[in-house]
Image (cartoon, rainbow, N blue to C red):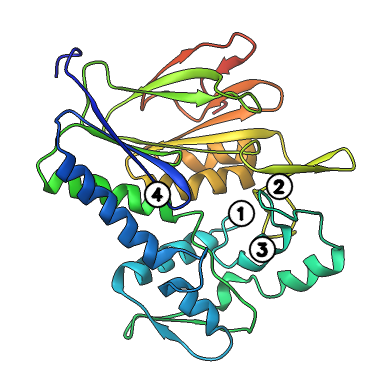
Amino acid sequence: MPSASRVYSYSAVLMGSPILLKLFSHDEALASRVFRLIKQYEDLLTVNRAQSQVMDINHAAGRHPVTVSQPVFELIRCAKTASLYPGSAFNLAIGPLVKRWKIGFKGDTVPPADDIASLLSITRPEDVLLDEANSSVLLAKAGMEIDLGAIAKGYIADRVRDYLRKEGADLGLINLGGNIQTLGSPEGGWSVGLKKPFAADELIGTMDVENMSVVTSGTYERYFEQDGKRYHHILDPRTGYPLDNELDSVTIVSKNSIDGDIWTTLMFGMGVEKGCAALRARPDIEAIFVTKAKEVIFSSSHLFRFTLLDNGYRVTDSIA
């Protein structure tokens, strides 16, 4: 595809985030169908309003199972599998802790230690009980809540990619509030920026990708400060407090955006050394770690081309 080809951009606000769709053909009808598809999935998965299939499960916690549609059941099963990964920082049942901290929302504050200890008892992923035969989900304890916010955008981005392919589009990019999924490759690939932590609209560098997803999770996205200490939104399900390690952000480059959602959280929990070791078994996934010491560390150097823009950071290809 010639680099001079025109790119058409379409935007909307869905899932509480700006959504951007880029196509190499002027097709407002296709863009409208894509946004309608996103809205349909949002209606199924949201926990930000009283009614959705996920909220139906939460309302029935400790009482009875709820039968859900196959897409919702499959996504919950995927989220539970990620939550049970050894030492996982991913937890689909972390909803009560997220609501108590309110990070990024009005009223955020450090909860009393007794509150956190109490809530940890109702955030066990093992207590999310799945019935394959009936596609039903039961939360074993009253007060439990599942929250698919850490995985829903990636799942939806992948469904949009699949839909665009079905509709005959061979070049496109979808940005779901930071979850980027690309279709095909214009000349030179799609250029995606790596954000500089705590700096508005500044980049550490750019990466050129094709037919790949790019997902970043960072401590700078949502946080508050209390008594001189910063508390970010990436909670450690093992302690109930924000994860505290050497990292400012983790970016995952992978074929599927849902893997990006899962592995950014897993990598945050593992840190650089353990994270790189874990990804040796996954050559289809690459992590970019940005540390508080201003290092940019790649788990490998095979899935994309990276260009450093900020010389205040130093790049390490891999610690493996």
List the residue tagged with mark 3: 99
Could you give the CA–CA distance between mark 3 and mark 4, rounded to whole angstroms?
22 Å
List the residue tagged with mark 1: 89
- Callout 1 secondary element: loop
Q: Earlier in the sequence, mark 4 or mark 2?
A: 4
Image quadrant occupied by the N terminus: top left
Q: Which residue lies furthest to the left in this view?
A: 168
List the residue tagged with mark 4: 154
Left or right position of 109 against 196:
right
Q: Which of marks 4 and 1 is nearer the N terminus?
A: 1
Could you give the CA–CA distance between mark 2 and mark 1, rounded to whole angstroms?
9 Å
Q: How dense is the environment of label 2, judged by Cα within 10 Å: few (below 14), some, or many (20 and up)?
A: many
| Between marks 3 and 4 in the image, the one whose residue lies nearer the viewer | 3
- Note whether 19 is above or below 72 in the view shown: above
Q: Residue furthest bottom?
A: 63
Residues marked 2 and 1 touching at CB (< 8 Å): yes
| Between marks 4 and 1 in the image, the one whose residue lies nearer the viewer | 4
Left or right position of 150 against 231:
left
Q: Residue furthest top?
A: 311
